[in-house]
Structure formats: structure tokens, C-alpha cells
Amino acid sequence: MLIILGTIALVVSLRVFFFDTYTIPTPSMEPAIMSGDHVVVNKMVPGPRIIKNFFSLGKKGKKPNFTRFPGARVKRKNYSIS
């Protein structure tokens, strides 16, 4: 039972903090991304988004207040060929 709960906690934390999957609903990005394609999004670049006030989620007309953790940017080196 402990292994199952640990696995569920690991999967949920990976989806919240590290990556998520989406389905492209419209053909607005064709021909690069087709309608119906599935993509995996790396959440570490912009930083994971966290809700500040969980109790505001059920209230109608009130927008939830989000904050972002700092992202993990990849630093690129500028190589010039002389």
C-alpha cells in the first residue's frame, strides 16, 4: 500500500512541477503542429505555476491568484567561427 501511495505522489508531483501533456485542439499551428497532436511541455523553463489561495478556486467570478517558482533557464554559449 505504501508503494502505491508513493508512486501516486511521485506522478502527481512530476506533473505539477516538471512536465505536463497537452492535446492541440485547433489547426492554428499547422503545418508545424497538426490538430490532435499530443505534446509534452517542460515546466522547468518558465517555472512551475502554483495557486496562492486554494479556497478561491470554487468561487464564481473570482480569478485564482497564481505565482511562479523561478525557472531553470539553459545558458547558451556564443561560439563564433573565425
Image (cartoon, helix red, strand yellow):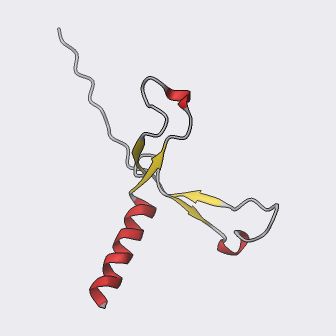
Could you say where residue 81 lies in the image, as x and y percent from the top left?
18, 12
The residue lying at 41 percent from left, 70 percent from top is 12
Give the camera-side residue of 62 and 69: 62
Indicate whether 32 appears above or below 72.
above
Would you identify the image quadrant in which residue 3 lies? bottom left
Q: Residue furthest left?
A: 82
Q: Residue furthest bottom?
A: 1
Query: At x 68% / y 61%, what residue is drawn?
Result: 65
Location of residue 26 by image quarter = top right
| Residue 51 coordinates in the image, percent (x, y) | 60, 65
Tell me where residue 1 appears, x and y as whole percent. 31, 91
In the image, 79 versus 10, the foreground residue is: 10
Query: Does residue 48 appear to the left or right of 63 in the view shown?
Result: left
Left or right of 54? Residue 68 is: left
Q: Nearer the viewer, residue 65 or 31?
A: 31
Q: Residue at x 44, y 23 (%)?
A: 31
54 with respect to 75 (left or right):
right
Q: Please tell me whether residue 18 is drawn above or below residue 34 in the rendered image.
A: below
